[in-house]
Amino acid sequence: MTRTLVFGGARSGKSAYAEQLAIATGKEVVYIATARAGDGEMAVRIAHHQRQRPAIWTTVEEPLALAAALRQWCAPQRLVLVDCLTLWLSNLMFAGGTDYPDVGEITLPEQFHVQRAALLAALEHAAGDVVLVSNEVGMGIVPYGAISRVFTDEAGRLNQAVAAVCDRAVLVAAGLPLVLKGAPC
């Protein structure tokens, strides 16, 4: 059983790289999609990702209960590919319909903390291979607005926690993988 975090910037090639890793195993693949098509642009992005995936893969749409989906689908003969953690993170942050202030202290919903902890526990005990895709959002300027800063902070914390649990961590930039932790893929 191998757990791999693949992360990088927007349009860096991280999803394509993660999909190549999944194909290379020769195992049955379950693709857990965390995205929601909240607008036309996101619907186009989702459709693009759907066209890229092999038709024989099982696709599971799970925007919030990612740990439960991992527990359900992970198995020794299977690889579970999760795309992506940062969309899942934003889903959790806004699941309650909270209208966050532009300035000041922000308290995230309890579900955020419960689901985050459950994900890390599910990863530690995954019964099969898992590849997780995430965005690296902390390499630019400090974002304007309190909720944007909280999102950047939480994405960084999540990536660190997931990388600590994973056997491999791979940074993808310009379509090129750089293995930061573990054996080369």
Image (tube, rainbow, N blue to C red):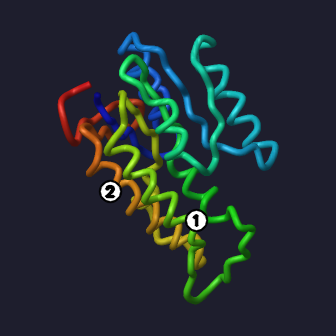
Query: The N terminus is located in which quarter?
Result: top left
Taking the view exactly as shown, the residue that stands out farthest to the left is 183
Relative to residue 53, is residue 171 depicted above or below? below
Q: In the picture provided, is 5 more to the left or to the right than 183?
A: right
Secondary structure at numbered mark 1: helix
What's the residue type where badge 1 is placed?
Answer: Gln
Residue 165 pos. (x, y %): 28, 48
Q: In the picture provided, is 43 more to the left or to the right than 113?
A: right
Residue indicated by mark 2: 160
Other residues around mark 2 within 10 Å, as few (<14) / some (14–19) / many (≥20) = some
Q: In the picture provided, is 124 more to the left or to the right than 73?
A: left
Residue indicated by mark 1: 111
Query: In the image, what residue occupies the spot 38% across and 22% down?
Result: 21
Residue 185 falls in image quadrant: top left
* Label whose residue precedes the other's in the sequence (1 or 2): 1
Which of 18/178 is in front? 18
Secondary structure at numbered mark 2: helix
Query: In the image, what residue occupies the spot 24% across and 36% down?
Result: 179
Query: In the image, what residue occupies the spot 36% across and 15% down?
Result: 25
Q: Which mark is residue 130?
A: none
Residue 78 falls in image quadrant: top left
Q: In the picture provided, is 2 more to the left or to the right than 133?
A: left
Nearer mark to the viewer, of 1 and 2:
1
Which of 137/58 is in front? 58
Residue 168 pos. (x, y %): 26, 37
Relative to residue 96, is residue 166 depicted above or below? above
Question: Total marks drawn?
Answer: 2
What's the residue type where badge 2 is placed?
Answer: Gln
Label 1, label 2: how far apart the Cα atoms are: 20 Å
Residue 140 pos. (x, y %): 44, 62
